[in-house]
Image (cartoon, helix red, strand yellow):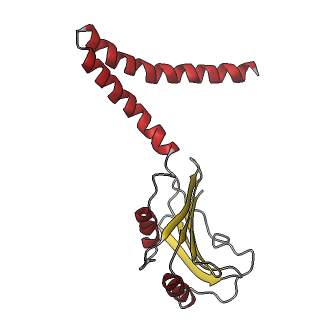
Amino acid sequence: MESFLGFWSFIIFLTIIIIGVPIFLAYWIPKRYGNRKLGVGLAIVVALIFATPILSFVLEDYLFFKSDAAESLKEHGIILQDDFYLESNKMTGIGDFYHRFVLEISKNDKNRLSGNILNSVNYKDSISDTFDIRSGKPRYSDTTQDFIVTYQDKWSYVYEYYELNKKGKTPTWDRISISKKENELIYERILD
């Protein structure tokens, strides 16, 4: 327990030094030469430089907009013709990344997209309940390879995309589903 507390105390102390010293010096050096206002301004700029990455990570769920959702769907050739509402958005993970957003779409877009899935060349009639597009495929490839499958289950019409990448870069797995009951589109991306 002591080593745990000692380790985290050291990490907190080191963080304060790494962040606090540049902010203090940005204020103190101009103040010492008689320009306190410049010191305050520089200290604020240096503090913002350190705060920006932290705040962007903490607030990334709130910095995701409808245009970002449309861009994510466009990667797969899915374009919503009518206006839509971003119901929810959640991003988690540092090493393993998971992104999920839910859109309320129009009935016309729902019918058009579900028809596209049913008429896709990649459509599979019979998919087991435990279907996973990743099973039986290698995790990495020397060349970029992608796999696409479309199908329907009891609850939704589904488009799945799996892209193998070179060693050292995580594979991409996207799942886009359109609810059969609701006018709802769910997008999920997993990088693991």
Residue 56, placed above or below residue 84: above
Tally of numbered tags = 0
Q: Quadrant of the N terminus?
A: top right
Rendering coords of residue 134 (x, y %):
64, 69
Residue drawn at x 43%, y 74% as measured from the top left: 83
Q: Quadrant of residue 128?
A: bottom right
Residue drawn at x 49%, y 68% as measured from the top left: 85
Rendering coords of residue 2 (x, y %):
74, 18
Residue 125, placed above or below residue 39: below
Residue 96, placed above or below residue 139: above
Residue drawn at x 38%, y 21% as measured from the top left: 23
Q: Quadrant of residue 48?
A: top left
On the picture, is 110 further left or further right than 124? left
Residue drawn at x 42%, y 18% as measured from the top left: 21
Residue closer to the observer: 117 or 81: 81
Residue closer to the observer: 126 or 108: 108
Rendering coords of residue 108 (x, y %):
49, 85
On the picture, is 73 further left or further right than 94? left
On the picture, is 77 further left or further right than 159? left
